Image (tube, grey):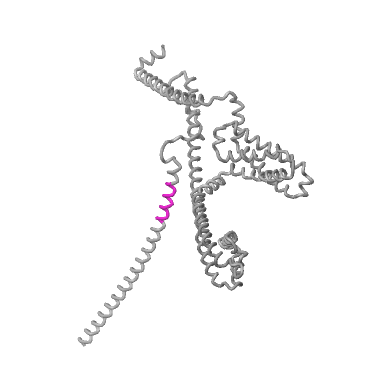
């Protein structure tokens, strides 16, 4: 009270104290409103997904989100593929049969643990992912030989076929490599266009198979082994469309005296291989290019999302520090600002909302600078060429002026000589 009375008597100090207290109250009120909105949103988000086993859930979620976990699964897949390759050696499998069985059960235990952990963390998201569903199907198929009893020979043959499906475990690598996922998506999206191309190719092969059957399929004078029926003719045309061994097929027809068959073979290869087969390859390549572009855009979006998350984390940390300062504040607003400045570090990120801080703007700006550099280079080349042309023109003008001056001097000298002769 005595300090306030002294300040009040000092005049200007009294008004300064009023301004500082007013600013402090405004800042506290605005921050309390800002913080209340943030806490309410966080509480609403947290209240929608409440689990009773929070500690165990966080522990499992942290494990599955680490890159070390994915790396361990990748190493397991590679080792499993290596062991399956070694099992194809009969002698080695006979000597180490027990070891291979234990190793297979060990790999199955790791795959099962991965499946249970991911389903436990977020079952809804897991079953919405097609790659996860594919992994689960492979896991179920791998469990079939373990619980099935091999009785008769037919059952043993079926078990061999089922065990052969263990090789599908190698496809689990697609779930961990996003580049492979983009290629798989591209291949599935090309199915519609590829079906159309293959349908046209099949119609073409059917027409030529009928023609080939009637021209070259005669049992007495033709080649019934390759053109004797519709199935053989289609298989022969498949060899022609892949340009695999077509010279041998044509040689057989030439040996039978059918020289006109060369026109048939050339026309079919031109249409089937150079048009339809290359069209099939072109459709696949175009879709892969589109998928690669979409993959790059997704990576760019994830980078921008990570930057937004980093900004949000910085703002939350600054909120927490301001809240601690306000709770421990007993002085005026000036001291509050000074203490907050002391809590800042030179390594802190600066959160900005300007357009110039976005990744897309930076890319456009750098591209513009590249175009500007190219334009400046071209202008410099044009300037050097213009200077060269002007220097040549100037040199020609100087030579012409010198020649003109020499002619004028000669004329004057001749006139002087004439005058001198006339005076004599």
Q: Which residue is at the front of the view, 361 or 212?
A: 212
Q: Which residue is at the front of the view, 224 or 241?
A: 224
Q: Residue at x 41, y 57 (%)?
A: 377
Q: Which secondary structure is most common in the magenta stretch?
A: helix
Looking at the image, residue 419 sits to the left or right of residue 368; the answer is: left
* Magenta stretch holds residue 218: no
Q: Which of the 4 quarters of the picture holds residue 27?
A: top left
Q: Residue furthest top?
A: 1
| Highlighted magenta segment, given as a residue range | 364-376
* Quadrant containing the N terminus in the rendered view: top left
The percent coordinates of residue 61 (x first, y second) are: 59, 31
Looking at the image, residue 396 sits to the left or right of residue 189; the answer is: left
The percent coordinates of residue 83 (x first, y second) are: 71, 45
Q: Which residue is at the front of the view, 307 or 63?
A: 63
Q: Is residue 135 above or below residue 373?
A: above
* Magenta stretch holds residue 366: yes
Q: Residue furthest bottom?
A: 424
The percent coordinates of residue 18 (x first, y second) are: 37, 19
Q: Residue at x 39, y 14 (%)?
A: 6
Q: Residue at x 53, y 47 (%)?
A: 188
Q: Residue furthest right?
A: 95
Q: Which of the 4 quarters of the picture holds residue 68?
A: top right
Visible in this render: residue 302?
yes
* Quadrant containing the C terminus in the rendered view: bottom left
Looking at the image, residue 381 sits to the left or right of residue 127; the answer is: left
Q: Residue furthest left?
A: 423
Visible in this render: residue 321?
no
Q: Which residue is at the front of the view, 272 or 301?
A: 272
Q: Residue at x 54, y 34 (%)?
A: 125
The percent coordinates of residue 182 (x first, y second) are: 53, 46
Q: Is residue 249 above or below residue 183?
A: below
Looking at the image, residue 92 sits to the left or right of residue 351; the answer is: right
């Amino acid at each position: 009270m005595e300090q306030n009375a002294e300040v009040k008597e000092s005049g200007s100090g009294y008004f300064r104290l009023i301004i500082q207290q007013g600013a402090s109250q405004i800042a506290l009120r605005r921050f309390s409103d800002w913080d209340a909105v943030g806490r309410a949103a966080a509480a609403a988000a947290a209240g929608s997904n409440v689990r009773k086993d929070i500690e165990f859930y966080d522990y499992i979620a942290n494990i599955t989100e680490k890159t070390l976990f994915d790396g361990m699964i990748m190493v397991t897949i590679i080792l499993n593929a290596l062991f399956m390759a070694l099992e194809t050696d009969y002698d080695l499998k006979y000597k180490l049969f027990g070891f291979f069985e234990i190793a297979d059960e060990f790999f199955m235990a790791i795959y099962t643990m991965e499946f249970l952990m991911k389903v436990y963390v977020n079952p809804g998201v897991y079953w919405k992912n097609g790659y996860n569903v594919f992994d689960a199907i492979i896991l179920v198929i791998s469990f079939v030989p373990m619980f099935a009893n091999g009785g008769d020979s037919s059952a043993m043959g079926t078990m061999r076929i089922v065990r052969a499906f263990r090789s599908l475990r190698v496809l689990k690598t697609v779930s961990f490599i996003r580049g492979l996922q983009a290629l798989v998506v591209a291949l599935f999206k090309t199915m519609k266009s590829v079906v159309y191309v293959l349908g046209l190719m099949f119609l073409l092969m059917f027409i030529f198979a009928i023609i080939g059957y009637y021209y070259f399929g005669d049992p007495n004078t033709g080649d019934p082994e390759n053109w004797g029926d519709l199935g053989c003719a289609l298989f022969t045309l498949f060899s022609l469309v892949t340009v695999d061994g077509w010279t041998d097929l044509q040689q057989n027809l030439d040996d039978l005296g059918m020289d006109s068959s060369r026109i048939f073979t050339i026309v079919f290869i031109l249409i089937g291989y150079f048009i339809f087969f290359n069209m099939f390859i072109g459709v696949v390549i175009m879709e892969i290019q589109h998928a690669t572009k979409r993959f790059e855009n997704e990576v760019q979006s994830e980078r921008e999302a990570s930057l937004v998350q980093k900004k949000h984390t910085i703002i939350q940390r600054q909120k927490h520090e301001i809240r601690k300062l306000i709770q421990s504040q007993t002085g005026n607003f000036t001291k509050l600002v000074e203490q907050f400045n002391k809590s800042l570090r030179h390594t802190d990120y600066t959160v900005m909302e300007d357009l110039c801080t976005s990744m897309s703007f930076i890319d456009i700006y750098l591209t513009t600078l590249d175009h500007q550099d190219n334009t400046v280079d071209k202008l410099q080349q044009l300037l050097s060429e213009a200077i060269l042309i002007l220097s040549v023109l100037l040199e020609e003008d100087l030579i012409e002026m010198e020649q003109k001056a020499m002619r004028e001097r000669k004329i004057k000298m001749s006139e002087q000589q004439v005058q001198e002769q006339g005076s004599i």
